[in-house]
Structures are given as structure tokens and as C-alpha cells.
Image (cartoon, grey):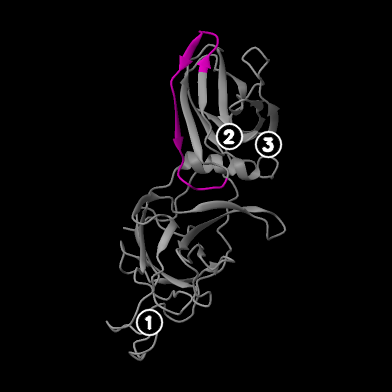
Amino acid sequence: MRLSSATFLFATCAALTLTGCDDDDPIVTPDAGSSTDAGTDAGSDAGTDAGSDAGTDAGTPTSTATVTASRPSEGEPDVYPLEMYLDASGQTPVIAFRKVLTLTFSEPMDVSAAQVTLHDRTDATVPARVLTGAWSEDARTLTVTVPRTEESTRPLEVSTHYVLSLEALKDAAGLALSDTSLDFTTGERDPALEHACTHTLVNTPEAVTAGRTPFDFPPDTHTGHALYDVTLRSGEAGFGGYTGFISDAESAEHVTLYLNQQVPTKVTNDTAGTDVASVLAPARFICAGITHTVKFTSEPGDQIHLFQFGPVASEHIQFVLERE
């Protein structure tokens, strides 16, 4: 049975400048991006002459062009079924859904051929979707935006095997590809991750400057739902520094930092003088503002913790802090 549009509770503010969270759902509207292309089928014409470049007979030469990189990658499991972005095309910016697929080729391609076909292999009753991509200036990277469907607020279904057909693409010489498909499978949605993404899209960042040492009055960064923009200190190995966190007075909490880049992060309980076990891991791609997470558990008692960031190449990092 197909899943209906999932409903998730996001504690976000109605205005773009967010200073806190309440229990209202966020204003999330479907992507108003380009609709599916109603053009000709991406497959080769059955009437094509055997001697033409676009022919499909066994003796017809094929292109040496190959896909060298793609997002998602070939055979990738657990692909997030949507991306969240801020659509500012209307009078009031809104959070919208889409899914962007990219394919990079080993050589320049024919930019006049930009159609691909998306097939749902989990549910054979779902019609194929013909989409038109956009080529990069060097004619090697095709970007395909998958908009929402008429039946759903999301561009792709959860837990679904998809095949992207590339049969209509040609290289610069007009030769068809020998590898004509990209397979991937979507996973389930993550309400907590989507909630954090809303903060990266609509919050006004709270700017702080990290302490150079633990004794350099590190700024507090313990407010839940806040988006912090941290200026790090320069050092021999790169940029780094310290910020502070105070645990809840009565309850242990699961704390997550949603980072906009990979940042080595150490968590210490300064009150107890002990290190706190934490895990830095890549995040599933859903929005541009989150690439990695740091997770740890804080003990109750208003205990002072320190986040030690770096070294990294960037002077600025951003993260959303969530505590539950």
C-alpha cells in the first residue's frame, strides 16, 4: 500500500526571523518548480535507420562517454526522498520540496539532448516521468530537478526503487550512451532532521566568537532550536576554538549539533573534569545547511560542558543545536 503524504511536526516560527519555537507546524509548501516535461519519449525511435548515429542495431557505434560521478550514486540505498529549500520566488518566502539529481560525464555531451526518464520499479502502476535537465557550461554535468507530483507533496516516494533512464542522452558526436541507467533506492524520512533543516533555512544566525582556550570565556551555545554562526580562532593547524553548553538542571538529555560542514568536535564535562562520549557522523543530504551531526548525552545538574571545534580550514562554522 502506498504511503500517503507524511505529516511531521516541526517546531518553527511563522516569520523568517526565528527567535524560538512553538508547537505549530511549519509553513511548508510543495515545490513549485518546473513540471514534468510532456515531450517525446526518451527512448530511441523504433523507425530510426540502421545506419544513423541514433540507431539501435548491434552494429551501430556507441559513445565512449561514461558517468564519472552522480548524486545519488549508482545503487545508493537510503537516499532521502526530498530536499528542503527556501523558495523566494513569491511575495513571501516559503519552505518547499524538490529533489535534485546530478550526473557528470567523462567527456562533453550533446546539450540539445537533455531528457531523462524516471521509472518507479517498486510500483509498476506509477507512470514514468519524463524530465528535462540543464547542462553545465562545459557540457559535462546534467542537473535534473524532480518536482512534486500532482498526487503527493514530495517529489519521490519513501522506500522506493527508482531507475533513471539516460537513453535519450548523446555525446558531442551524437552517439548514444552504452550505460543508460542510474539505479537508487529511497529511504524513510527523518522528522528531527527536517526540523533542524527548517532552522537553517529561516533562522537568523546567532553570531558568537569561540574562545581560544577553555579559560578564554567561551560563549554559551546551549539554546535549543538556535542556529549558531561561530567565528573560530586561527592556529597553526587551521581554525578552532571553544564554546559552552550547560546541561539541564533535572534531566539527562540527548543533544545533537547539526553542522554545516565536517568539524572535529570534542565534548567535555568541565564541571566533572571528564570527556563526554560523542559521535561525529555524516548526515543524509536534505538541505544545504546540514552535512554532519555530533550527538552526545548530557547528565543533569546544570553542569558546564565545553565544545572544542577544529582544526578546520574554514574560519566560520554553523550549527543548529537540538536538545531532547
Q: Over which residues does the magenta segment extend?
A: 268-288
Residue 39 in sight here: yes
Amino acid at dot 3 = Pro
| Residue 279 magenta | yes
Q: Label 1: few (<14), some or many (≥20) within 10 Å?
A: some
Q: Residue furthest right?
A: 91
Where is mark 2, residue-wise?
Answer: 320
Q: Label 3: few (<14), some or many (≥20) within 10 Å?
A: some
Front disc: 1 or 3: 1
Considering the numbered disc 3 on the image, is that residue within a helix, a strand or a loop? loop
Q: Label 2: few (<14), some or many (≥20) within 10 Å?
A: many
Residue 302, horizontal then vertical, whole percent: 56, 13
Where is mark 1, residue-wise?
Answer: 44
Q: Quadrant of residue 162?
A: bottom left
Vertical relation: 201 (above or below) 87: above
Residue 219, horizontal then vertical, whole percent: 67, 21
Could you tell which of marks 1 and 2 lies nearer the N-terminus?
1
At 55% from the left edge and 9% from the top edge, which residue is drawn? 271
Residue 9 in sight here: no
Residue 52, numbered circle: none
| Residue 198 magenta | no
Vertical relation: 175 (above or below) 49: above
